[in-house]
Amino acid sequence: MNASHPLARWQSALPFWMSFALLPLVWIGAIKGGWIIILTPLATWYLFTILDGIFGLNLENADPQTPDEDLVWYRALTLVWVPLQFVMIYGLIWYVTRSDHLSGLGKFGVFFGVGVLSGTIGINYSHELMHQKSRLERWLGDILLSMVLYSHFRSEHLLVHHRYVGTPRDPVTARYNEGFHRFYPRVLKQSWLSSFGAEKAMLARKDLPWSDLSNPFFRYWGLQAGMVLLAFLIGGWGGVILFLVQAGVAIWQLELVNYVEHYGLTRKHLGDGKYEHVQPRHSWNAAQKASNWLLINLQRHSDHHYKPDRRFPLLQNHTPGDAPQLPHGYPVMTVAAMIPPLWRRIMNPRVRRWRKMYYPEITDWSPYNKSSNPMPK
């Protein structure tokens, strides 16, 4: 490793490890009970928003040609999180199902906080891992997703979302004026159908049926069944219910972020079912420093779609001239997304300005607001 390279020093990666400080909070909440239980979601959603106000924006960019050997400390945090999340979920199932100081609401609150972490951090780290070439990293990404019963997200994200983002064929691209409460049930159904359809289509091109054991859905189902079974063995049916609570919260957190990332942004239709290439302007960008520490630069989403193979420390920040900018980081924007009138008041004028800036020649946007068959060909 080139120790002289700025990214090679452990101090440069240290801010991204701040998310690990949230793990003790959920344990303290389970042990102490009472109002302390809510510290985990409060810290995740609001502490980093306060820190955004203190630290401001990060507009600097690392050298995108930095070799992997200089990113050891950045890669390590996504790997180390996997066993720690496993211990958090199943250790707390063991503890909470055997505790008599927590009410039913208290137990729900503890695992609501667990879901905030397994969704905000765990699924986000799985997203980083699934994009890597390393077999170990991809497997660890699958393990993280199985802990929240959303394993198909890997197939949907890699085979559908990145291919069809900003088009009616992508379930995850939120349409203009589509409130989150309409988006959420739609995307839960369509993302599963589109991911299964994408894998089935890949097998068909090899003259194989969907039931062939090379279909990753068998791995997904096996891992998920194992996670649920382990919850039952540790905590009985109560353990399964608590496991499902955290999984549901995690999925909700993921889809809130998905909703924010592409709301109202579309690629220009070129005719014959073809669309322009994905550009930084097709994702919302956010440069808030602290929330990017929490989310390992996920808010540099414009660059992620432009160069999907870049590891998170190398993602580039795009200026307002190249990519649309969110007014706040994801923690604030996801809360706004839960209140559709507020969301439309904040975001619809920005979408309209974006349309005038990049596509002044398009006068009828209605075809871009429709969803089509989510099953890829």
Image: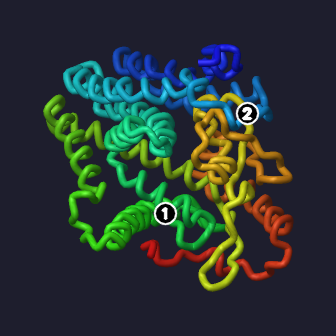
For the C terminus, give its image quadrant.
bottom left
Front residue (pair 93, 309): 309
**Residue at disc 2, secondary structure:** loop
Colour convention of the picture? rainbow
Q: Kindly identify the residue that appears in the image at 62 percent across and 31 percent down.
A: 67
The answer to whether any part of residue 124 appears in the image is yes
Tally of marks: 2
Residue 279: give x, y in percent of width and height: 71, 59
Along the horizontal axis of the image, is 172 left or right of 350? Answer: left
Please state which amino acid type lies under the numbered disc 1: Val
Disc marking residue 105 = none
> Mark 1 and mark 2: span between their CA atoms?
29 Å
Labels 1 & 2 near each other (Cβ < 8 A) = no
Along the horizontal axis of the image, is 234 left or right of 14? Answer: left
Disc marking residue 160 = 1
For the N terminus, give its image quadrant.
top right
> In the figure, 138 relative to 360: above or below?
above
Which corner quadrant of the image does residue 365 belong to? Answer: bottom right
Along the horizontal axis of the image, is 176 left or right of 55? Answer: left
Name the residue that disc number 2 marks: 63
The answer to whether any part of residue 43 appears in the image is no
Front residue (pair 269, 277): 277
Question: Crowding near pointer 2: few (<14 within 10 Å), some, many (20+)?
Answer: few
Residue 177: give x, y in percent of width and height: 65, 67
Q: Kindly identify the residue that appears in the image at 76 percent across and 24 percent down.
A: 55
Residue 238: give x, y in percent of width and height: 20, 36
Which corner quadrant of the image does residue 115 belong to? Answer: top left
Residue ranking furthest to the bottom: 272
Please state which amino acid type lies under the numbered disc 2: Asp
Residue 63: give x, y in percent of width and height: 73, 33
